[in-house]
Image (tube, rainbow, N blue to C red):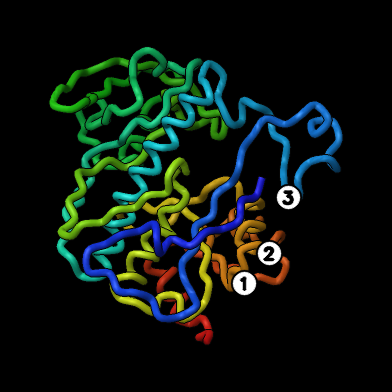
Amino acid sequence: MPDEAKPLVDLVLVEGERNPNDEGGILYVDVLVRKASFAEEQIPALRPDGADAVPAHAIVPEGSSFQDRREENLRAMDRSQEVAAAVALRELGYDVGSDPEGALVVAVAEDAPAAGKLEAGEVIVAVDGTAVATPDDLRRQIGRHEAGETVRLRVRAGDDTRTVEVGTIASPDDPEQPIVGIQVEQFAEIDVPIDVEIDLGNVGGPSAGLAFALDLVEELRGDVDRGNLVAATGEIQLDGTVSPVGGLKQKTIGAKRAGADVFLVPAGDNAAVARRNADGMRIIAVESFQQALQELATVPRKG
């Protein structure tokens, strides 16, 4: 279900921040999830406005639990905050340590070859003896195999490393691409030179990364929003790339309900969904954090 977008200004504390003196601000968006009643499941008209009914396994994979999913989402939120701080502070000229050091395992499918061999929180640092610095490196190295072959993964957990052999299967999305059945994201030891604290309470997931980074620049440099209410969603990567996220229909409705003047979203399918549900709100599609700043600089000043 949609949840009204909320301002970040009081939830993001950064050393040296300034107090905004306009009516604008950066908003983050999320979605609410709950079990549908039998009546809501059977009769769409009884569902809350903007809500969609989806199979339970689309939210919680088979063999997992809501608590497992919750913990994964909170870990992803923590990670998105670190990455957003690194990207924003680097943009402002700070010296940020954030060298990519492998592919962080964030989830393992129960019925995949990796089940029982890899665990969430481990970092894959090599495939068949070849170093892996990014998730793209991992996919590329595994992609050298045929589905059904075995790969040797070098895995780090804290100070311990081990090598494990894992089988591969064909990706359901691309039969030519072998996979081991894990979800990964960029791992890096991030070292920022000033104190940054972000607290969204029990909100989880990585999709507020773009909003975090924009708010940090707004609070330290100012005038990112140009007096507008700016809602944003998108997972941010260490190089500033903005990746697609889920729930765009509900997030767009939430941004509209909050009175957002513009809504920044990942380019592609995310932007298409947002435009279908914008009801006159301006949608800005972006592929990177740098593009987001450039696009906002062209938005007419308000107030």
Give the total of numbered labels: 3
Instruction: Kindly identify which numbered label has been placed on residue 278.
Output: 2
What type is the residue that disc 3 sits on? Answer: Gly
Q: Are marks 2 and 1 in contact (CB under 8 Å)?
A: yes
Observer-nearest residue: 81 or 109?
81
- Name the residue rendered at 57%, 45% in the picture: 246
Q: Compare residues 230 and 17 and report the one nearer the observer.
A: 17
Disc marking residue 106: none
Residue at mark 3 to residue at mark 1: CA–CA distance: 19 Å
In the rendered structure, the answer to whether residue 266 lies left or right of residue 220 reads right
Which kind of residue does numbered mark 2 sit on?
Ala
Task: Tell me residue 283's x, y (percent).
Answer: 60, 68
Q: Mark 1 points at which residue?
A: 282
Q: Mark 3 points at which residue?
A: 50
Q: Give the residue displayed 43% in from the left and 56% down from the top.
A: 242
Give the Cα distance between marks 2 and 3. 12 Å
Q: What residue type is labelled 1?
A: Arg
Question: Which residue: 48% across, 54% down?
Answer: 234
| Sequence-earlier tag: 3 or 1 | 3
Residue plotted at (28% across, 27% down): 122
Horizontal and vertical percent position of residue 37:
76, 29
Of badges 3 and 1, nearer the viewer stands: 3
Q: What element carries label 1?
A: strand
